[in-house]
Image: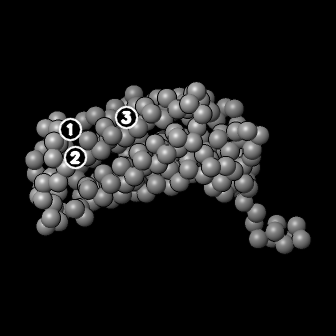
Amino acid sequence: MGNRLSKIYTRTGDKGTTGLGDGSRIDKDDLRVESMGDIDELNSLIGMLVCELPADDSLVEEFREIQQTLFNLGGELSVPGYALIEDQHIEELETLLDRLNEELPPLKDFILPGGNRAASVCHLARSVCRRAERRLVSLGKQNSIRPQCQAYLNRLSDLLFVSARTLARYDGGSEVLWRHRQQKQQAK
């Protein structure tokens, strides 16, 4: 893929366009660029999440692999017609998702983002993942997007939800349960 940047500023985007990996130029507010930006933001949040985990936590390596795949997903969007996300990537998320979910109690109530800092960052990553997925759906209405890309983000948001539930329990913590307004009044 393209040359590595030796100079960070090029001035080529000063008029509101950006270059894709195939050499074409599109507007910076194009849905393709918006999708790549959401995926980049998600990748950054997962990097922040990794910083919240103990270095020897098994999830660190899992999230680092997810970051690699997200970078590839952005690359696939940057080069229309290029394929980097495969069914195997989705299956890997499902395997991890099943493993983590197996260790959790059944979910009987809605939960609020929180519990501890790692769980909160994970919930933030989940909500950005959902936005990235919505943006990709919009992009797919205008352009041909491979179904693996959308499926990957869909599964990743599920994994981030289950991961947040797992992380909320670290160090003896717990999830923050949503109380319906009637429940709140009854508690008084």
Q: Choose mark 1 or mark 3, whichever is in front.
A: 3
The alpha-carbon separation of the residues under discs 1 and 2 comes to 8 Å
Picture disc at residue 68: 3
For the residue labelled by badge 3, is the local secondary structure a helix, a strand or a loop?
helix
The alpha-carbon separation of the residues under discs 3 and 2 comes to 15 Å
Q: Type of residue at label 2? A: Ser
Residue 42 visible from this viewpoint? yes
In primary-sequence order, the first of circles 1 and 3 is: 3
Q: Mark 1 = which residue?
A: 82
Neighbour tally class for label 1: few under 14, some 14-19, many 20 plus, Cα within 10 Å: some
Residue at 22% x, 46% y is 78
Q: Mark 2 = which residue?
A: 78
Q: Choose mark 3 or mark 2, whichever is in front.
A: 3
For the residue labelled by badge 1, is the local secondary structure a helix, a strand or a loop?
loop
Q: Type of residue at label 3? A: Gln
Please state the horizontal and vertical placement of residue 109, each as a whole percent of the image. Answer: 73, 53
Most distant residue in the front direction? 7
Residue at 52% x, 41% y is 51
In primary-sequence order, the first of circles 3 and 2 is: 3
Neighbour tally class for label 3: few under 14, some 14-19, many 20 plus, Cα within 10 Å: few
Q: Type of residue at label 1? A: Tyr
Residue at 22% x, 62% y is 28
For the residue labelled by badge 2, is the local secondary structure a helix, a strand or a loop?
helix
Neighbour tally class for label 2: few under 14, some 14-19, many 20 plus, Cα within 10 Å: many
